[in-house]
Amino acid sequence: MEFRDAALKMAGIENPYLAEQSKNREVKAIMADKKELQGFKNEGQKEKAKEILATLAEKLGKQKPAVVATQEQESASAKDLSQIVAKLPFGATLASSDEELKSFFVFGFDPQIPQYVVKDYCEKLAGPVSTKIAHRARCGFVTFESRSEADKFAKKLESVKISKSSKTAALVVLEKKYPVRFCWGAPKPLGGSGAEQGKIGAVVVKVMKQLAEKDASEGKRKRKTVTEEPRKAPKKTYNAEREIEL
């Protein structure tokens, strides 16, 4: 309807529909059909109006597939994103059965963290690394030059990590202000656009909270086990007379 009104105005034709404002777009369309030939000054204007409306209708008709295509693209993008997230090793730990692996998945950091902070930390503990960091996704990968250096890094993390659970990625704080988690993990794609990485980052935030809760639960369970007083074995009694006879 807006296209029609604008087109009629640009063509210099008096628009009879402006006086009738209906809240229902379908009602407007019906009214437009009934009054299509009313309100114009001459036949030339009527024909001109018909041509304009026909052209607009054709253009609007061509826009529908574009809307459908956009919806399909969004659906495909959401599917691709879920596949990307599913491949990220959020559930991994500092234990690895893959002897060829030399990389660690690092996640949970603030998007503003300088990349060198992660790199310097890893190299200080073990040795040179190459980094693949996606700041908006709040995660990335660090790869050591050898497996021995990677093993050394894992052992160092075991001794300095804040998290006490061995069932979650190691939690450490870089430069006393950037909490991050490390675990073994082969490099994976981290999104092809800023929007995708932003959504991955939102998932990372949720995972960090879940792992914190898991660590807290594990800590409570361990403390409860330690504080429980061990049961004393019952004293063995002997039959004195029987022992003497023997």
Image (tube, rainbow, N blue to C red):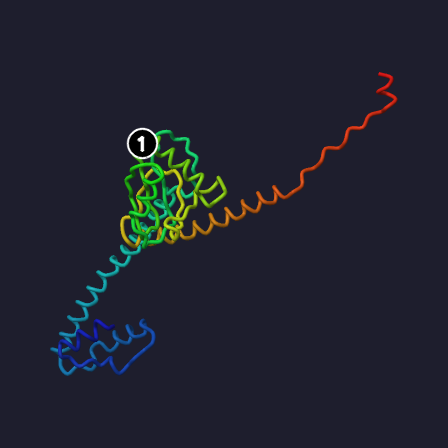
Q: Which residue is mark 1?
A: 146
User: In the image, residue 124 lies at what x, y percent?
Assistant: 33, 40
Query: In the image, is 184 to the left or to the right of 20?
Result: right
Q: Residue at x 38, y 34 (%)?
A: 152
Q: Residue at x 28, y 76 (%)?
A: 31
Q: Quadrant of the C terminus?
A: top right
User: In the image, residue 39 lies at what x, y percent?
Assistant: 20, 82
Instruction: Find numbered disc 1 in the image and state the secondary structure of the residue it sits on.
Output: loop
Q: Say what amino acid the circle numbered 1 marks.
A: Ser
Q: Residue furthest left?
A: 44
User: In the image, residue 138 lies at what x, y percent?
Assistant: 35, 50
Residue sitting nearer the eye, 144 or 100: 144
User: In the image, residue 57 lies at what x, y percent?
Assistant: 21, 66
Q: Residue at x 30, y 54 (%)?
A: 195
| Quadrant of residue 141 within the rendered picture | top left
Residue sitting nearer the eye, 45 or 181: 181
Relative height, residue 103 to residue 242 (above, below): below
Q: Quadrant of the N terminus?
A: bottom left
